[in-house]
Image (cartoon, rainbow, N blue to C red):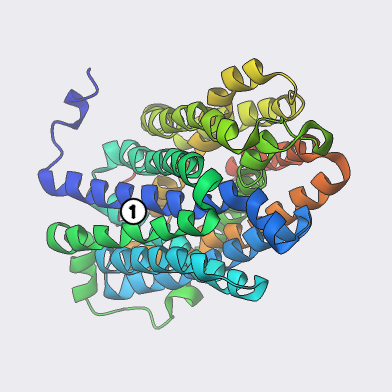
Amino acid sequence: MSFISQFGSITREQWKTLVAAQLGWMLDAMDIMLYAFALTTIQREFGLSSAEAGALASATLIASSAGGVLFGILADRIGRARSLMLSILVYSIFTALTATAGSLAELVLWRCLVGLGMGGEWSAGSVLVSETWPAEHRGKAIGLMQSGWAVGYIFAALLAAVILPDLGWRVLFLVGIAPAFLTLWIRKHVQEPAIWIDRARRPRVSKDNAIGEILRPPLLQKTLLGTLVTMSVLFAYWGLFTWMPSFLARPFDQGGAGLGIVKSSTWIIPMQIGAFFGYVLFGFLADRFGRRPVFLFFLLCAALLVPIYGQLARHEVVLLLLGPCIGFFGHGYFSVFGAMLSELFPTHIRATAQGLVYNGGRAFSALAPYTVGALADQYGVGSALAVTAAFFLAGAGLMFLLPETRGQHLQ
C-alpha cells in the first residue's frame, strides 16, 4: 500500500488541522532553537559560564512546563484551535522581544515568556490532531505533526548561518515574530474537533476539577508513569540538543568539534533531515507494531549512538555521516506522546492531562541544559553529552509499565 493511499479516507478538514498543528510546531522549534545557535555568542556578550548559559535555557524549559499545563487547561475549556492560536502568538511575540534584552535579567524574562507559548503549542496542537484523526492513523498524524520540529530546527540553522556572523543575535531573534501571522490562517480554516464540541455541551458528572481527577485513581497511576517517561526522555533530549550546536561549533580545547558557527549550522541540517524521517517513520511503525516496542527500539539506539558521537570531535566526516542517525533516533520517539497520551485519558480532561504529564517531564528536563553545561565546564561538551544516554535507557524501561494503546478509539 502506497504512502498516499493509506490516507484516502482523510478529509480536507482533517488535513487542515494537521497542517495547522505541524506549522505551529515547526515555527515553535525555529523560535526556541534560535537560542541554541546563538548560545555561544550570547554567552560571550553577557560573560556567562557554560553552566549559566545552560541555566538560561533551563529557565525557558521551566516556563514552558507551566505554559503546557496552563494551555492544556485552556484547551479543555475554550477549545483546542483557540488555545493553539494564543500559544503561537505568545512564543512569536516574545521571541522577537528577546532582541531588545539589554541585561541578563531582561534576557531571562523574555526567554521565560517564550517558554510559556512553547509549552502551550504542543498541549493544544497534539490534542487537536489526536481528536480529529481516526484511530488507525493517529500515530502517523502525530508523527507528521512532530516532523515539523525538524523542519523548524533546520530553518533556525539556516537563519543562524546567514544572520549571526554579520548581523548578530539580536537581528536573529527579530525573525521570530513570523509565526504570529500563522494564526490568521488558523482562525479562518481550522475548526474545533467534533468530539470536544460534543463533550463540551454535556453537563459534567464529576465534581472534581480536571487536575484533581487526573491525580486520583483510576488515572493516578497512568499520570505518574507517563510523567516519569517524559521526565527521562525530555531530560535526555534537551541535554543533548541544547548543547549540540555548541558542541559542533566550539574549539577542540573546550571539548568541541571546532567547526565554527557557519559550518556547525551546516552540519545540523543533515541531522535534522534524519530527525524528520525519524518522526514520520515512528508514527507509521507505531500504528503497525504498537507504541511500546517501537519506542524501546528508538531509545536503545539513541543511548548507544550519543556517547560515541560525543567522542568523535576530531572526525568531521564521521560526524557528518553519523548526524542523520543521531537525528533519526534522538528525535523520532517524540511521536509517541501525542498519540499515546491522548489514548490514556478521556476527552473532558485530555488536554489538561497531556499538558500536565508532558510538561511535568519538561519541568524536570529544565535541569538538563544546566547539568550538561556544568559537566562541559569540567570535561568538555562532547564528554558531557554522554550523560543523556542513561536517561534514554530509563525512559525505555519505564514505558513498558504503561498499557499498549495502539488502535484505541477516543472516548
Residue 101 location, x and y as percent? 56, 70
Quadrant into which the N terminus falls: top left
Q: Is residue 268 left or right of residue 304?
A: left
Mark 1 closeness class: few <14, some 14–19, many ≥20 residues within 10 Å: many
Up/down of 349 relative to 368, above or below:
below
Question: Is residue 193 in view from this perspective?
Answer: no
| Element marked by disc 1 | helix
Q: Quadrant of residue 182?
A: bottom left
Identify which residue is drawn at 44% across, 44% down: 159
The residue wearing badge 1 is 24
Q: Residue furthest bottom?
A: 207
Up/down of 376 relative to 286, above or below:
below
Identify which residue is drawn at 86% across, 40% down: 379
Q: Residue furthest front?
A: 166
Up/down of 58 relative to 39, above or below:
below
Q: Quadrant of residue 78?
A: bottom left
Observer-nearest of 298 and 404: 298
